[in-house]
């Protein structure tokens, strides 16, 4: 299959969706992004890389970072699962309702509350954002991957909801480190800027069942598959069912407009377009992945 | 792979789990089932069939019927999706809370409210339970598949909660037929008795991407894959995330103790053991499917 | 105090509010009522009666009936309190959410679920609507008080939500009689037509601490005061706090546009104007009672 | 009526309830209080003061402080009502669920979230805890009323839940001052130590319809009555309906074991006994007030 040509075709097919939806506006630094950008990259397990459009343009990782921090936390053992569940939340990504009903245990690691717990767990082994940067730089082979300081400052200045989530969990004894420190690491993770090409390469270990770019293992095969399972059931906020239905791949979205998806055994895909639907997923991004699985037949189902 | 031997091995591996959990006791007819039964069957797309334990012993389909009625409803078109969502519910299977917050549209077709809507939709083309029986008999080649009259009577006598769900949806205009008629069809569907062998063969169309036993199509490939996607995200009540994590296959459970799972392109699996966990899924059944994907590597992830 | 003049003054003071709000439209028979009606009556404990406007015009009791059925049920003993709570619900009058969280025990007797339980309890002593009619006729001295057959038929044809509530409670074992029978009695109670004058006289026993028009006791003083307490905390749907704040009297509203309020030891007041606010309380009715307590100083606080 | 004798009688009547329930244990400083204390004081509008038991023993005001800070905030105008509602919450005092559903506007000023907003509003005019201390000292004529430093330190060290509430409201734009500052003032208010005698005298302005001890007005009559209304509907956490039913007076409880109640036009009552029921109200305190209104007939109903 000529993936380069396929990606160009998809870019054409979804052109009507590019610019649709609303750019995330909860922080000024994200609200300024031009809405009509679109990029898509595929990294294959054999190392080949293909892209279209703005595929080399960096954008803000935001919640896509949650997949990588979960993987890093799990590389230290399964302890995090005592502090966070694995079920779809059925609620928006920043809801506190479920926490209150379930004694401060977040439903899954991909809602904000769950990701804060994962960061807190990973922080036992040093600064979580630094660990994430180190991993991403190694996987995509770019030492210049960095936290966007303007985005990070803007996030930190608009973090009251996440602060509330963290203190709420702390009130249930589900925070090991001081909330300000965990929030700082969380905010920096979300503010990392990367391109579709970088993200696809960095996520390739999930298509390779746990094997990193240098051939060493981050996770055993079973743990890697299970991250894919959590992505499929919980990776796109309260639209996970719809994403599974339309796309049929494990995927994780971010409000920066990116979505990373995994075709187990084959490739990692990253698409980016800033316009978001009502649930916070990139409109053109979901359409492009829908086209991708339709044209390739590479749904897991 | 010698599937017959594999199934025997699994039966041994999970023997400690057989009899664990609680037999469904909300109706007397189910409460009487002996808890220490265990059967497992695999039907491959080439037509071969393998089994172990009580794999030819009929048991009550219960919610497993929801997969088949959804497929039958979709064979008449996509209209049902205007009346029911595709998201995991995050709530128990018989909850009314979500309905109230979402104007009488059930979260997905596999919670009770959603299945009542699917039955109501299918009923536009004739009695839904009769249609289901006809389909099941054809797929597994047994004309004697039938509704267990004792179970059906017992279900009907304990259906106040489902009656409440149906009237509640009716109050939002989301019931086309009179509630007593829809409930009657729903109850008979749930009360069909089949063996693991029967169920595995009947579900094979989902592994064959929509193709029935006689080579005709019930659904196009895309629709069949999408049913698998809904099974994976919503098929095991509020434990769908956990099931995806442990088993990694589309699956649908019933409180009769059965679980049907699909390995796309390969086979359909049915396991049965009456002891249920707190969320209504067979304890030994989940363990057996976990072993199955671990030993075969046939997780979709 | 010249109450007749006072009522005329109030009618003038609130004239801008008459016709504001929306007439209840969930059943056709109520939706047809002319919105610009306004009546108000005061029955004093010495037997004197005063009124203004449409105070002798019959209208539909609706939820105001719940006060009387509660009193009648309590006249048979305190048993009903084992089946219904006494707390404000914090939710709309027809919500099922709370029921699900509290095992089928309604929060209070003035939400629909609670009133269904009260009717079911009262039905142990004969038809509840007949008992209510008998009581009302005796108290206001009019043998022609009756169920409006058109309203009752319309209510019965649009009762799916209440049917759902009743079956839901039945599923928790909190219904003694068959749901259709309880609903029939409930619907007829709500469909009784009475004027402000009739209602004020019928409610006078609550101002007289339990003593009926003929001098006999329906309830002891403590039980009567406690009904007033429940009215104050739960009598106006999810606006009870606001009503206590503005009016400062025990009161019970109905979607027919009526509100009955009690000044303990002094009088019963009934006001009617069909336009409802978003929470189902008469706009002009609340304003008139607000003026009434402001001008008389007769708030309980 | 000989109130001194009456209070002694009540102390005897409720002796079986003294020591029942559980002392608040969420902070060590409260958990150490001896459970078998009981005091009760009545301050009449004519200035006379009566008491029984430990009525001159200081204890921690806790949520009883919320009545006074509300009154002080209202003395500056009605602005606080734009930021907090007046409805019973139907949820525990420290719930976040309702906030999320209602855009960060707390249901009433007596749940923790609402009291944080009141403190934040009062803080516009200077330190809210200092203002409260000034008011209390003036009303009860004791310059030595003070914040218990040990309780305040303990509260501050266990304030994550309240911190979460405050940041959550901040995320909706419903906090004017920095959260740490508001929390500090809130914690100091709750940690004021006073006796039953002190509290009853300080609350007398609510029985006098707004008039302070020195004859000046804190609030106009209408505003004072309305605080009584809010106390009656919202003053005892999610047991307000039960308290209205049993006691029939506006009241506000605290987890220190105190309850203050108002008999409009007559007197203010304060009772203290540290054992709490499941909803956080003093067991013996509620019983004593129940006896008080039964024996005096001074229920508002």
Image (cartoon, coloured by chain):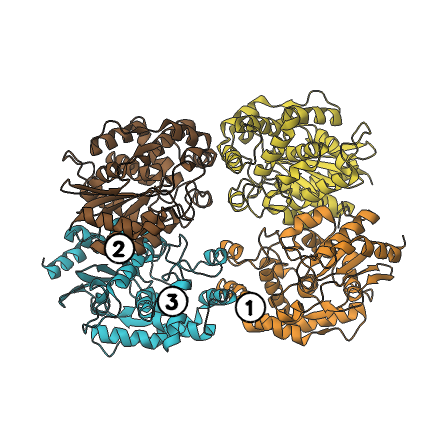
Chain colours: A orange, B yellow, C brown, D cyan
- Mark 1 or mark 3, which is nearer to you? 3
Residue B281 place in picture, x, y as percent = 61, 41
**Residue D45 seen in the figure:** yes
Q: Where, by quadrant of the figure, is residue A155 drawn?
A: bottom right
The residue that label 1 is drawn on is A176
Task: Say which residue appears at 47% left-offset and 36% top-offset.
Answer: C161
Mark 1 falls on what kind of element?
A: loop
Task: Say which residue appears at 32% left-offset and 26% top-offset.
Answer: C127
Question: Can you name the residue that lies furthest to the left here?
Answer: D2
Q: Where, by quadrant of the figure, is residue D210 drawn?
A: bottom left
Tag 2–tag 1 contact (CB < 8 Å): no
Pointer 2 chain: D
Quadrant where the N terminus of chain D sits is bottom left
Q: Is D161 rendered above or below residue B243?
A: below
The residue that label 2 is drawn on is D286
- Numbered circle sitting on residue D79: 3
Q: Is B115 rendered above or below residue D91?
A: above
Residue D203 place in picture, x, y as percent = 24, 66
- Numbered circle sitting on residue B210: none
- Mark 2 or mark 3, which is nearer to you? 3
Residue D133 place in picture, x, y as percent = 30, 75
Q: Is residue B107 left or right of residue C288?
A: right
Q: Is A216 rendered above or below residue B247?
A: below
In terms of sequence position, does the residue under pointer 2 or pointer 3 come before the other? 3
Same chain for the residues under marks 2 and 1 in the image: no
Q: Is A211 rendered above or below residue B45?
A: below
**Residue D272 seen in the figure:** no
């Amino acid at each position: 299959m000529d993936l380069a040509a396929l990606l160009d075709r998809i870019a054409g097919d979804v052109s009507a969706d590019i610019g649709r939806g609303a750019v995330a506006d909860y922080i000024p630094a994200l609200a300024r992004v031009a809405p009509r950008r679109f990029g898509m990259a595929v990294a294959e397990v054999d190392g080949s890389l293909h892209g279209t459009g703005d595929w080399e343009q960096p954008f803000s990782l935001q919640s896509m970072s949650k997949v990588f921090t979960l993987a890093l936390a799990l590389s230290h053992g399964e302890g995090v699962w005592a502090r966070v569940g694995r079920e779809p939340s059925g609620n928006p990504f920043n809801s506190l309702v479920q926490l209150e009903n379930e004694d401060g245990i977040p439903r899954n690691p991909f809602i904000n509350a769950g990701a804060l717990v994962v960061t807190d767990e990973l922080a036992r082994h040093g600064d979580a954002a630094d660990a994430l940067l180190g991993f991403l730089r190694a996987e995509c082979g770019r030492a210049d991957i960095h936290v966007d300081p303007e985005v990070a400052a803007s996030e930190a200045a608009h973090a009251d909801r996440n602060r509330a989530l963290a203190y709420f969990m702390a009130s249930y004894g589900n925070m090991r480190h001081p909330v300000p420190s965990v929030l700082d690491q969380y905010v920096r993770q979300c503010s990392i800027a990367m391109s579709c090409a970088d993200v696809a390469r960095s996520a390739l270990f999930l298509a390779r069942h746990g094997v990193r770019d240098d051939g060493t293992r981050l996770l055993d095969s079973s743990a890697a598959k299970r991250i894919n399972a959590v992505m499929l059931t919980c990776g796109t906020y309260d639209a996970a069912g719809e994403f599974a239905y339309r796309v049929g791949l494990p995927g994780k979205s971010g409000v920066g407009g990116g979505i990373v998806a995994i075709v187990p055994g084959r490739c990692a895909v990253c698409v980016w377009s800033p316009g978001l639907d009502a649930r916070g997923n990139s409109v053109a991004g979901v359409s492009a992945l829908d086209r991708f699985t339709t044209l390739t037949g590479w749904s897991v189902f």
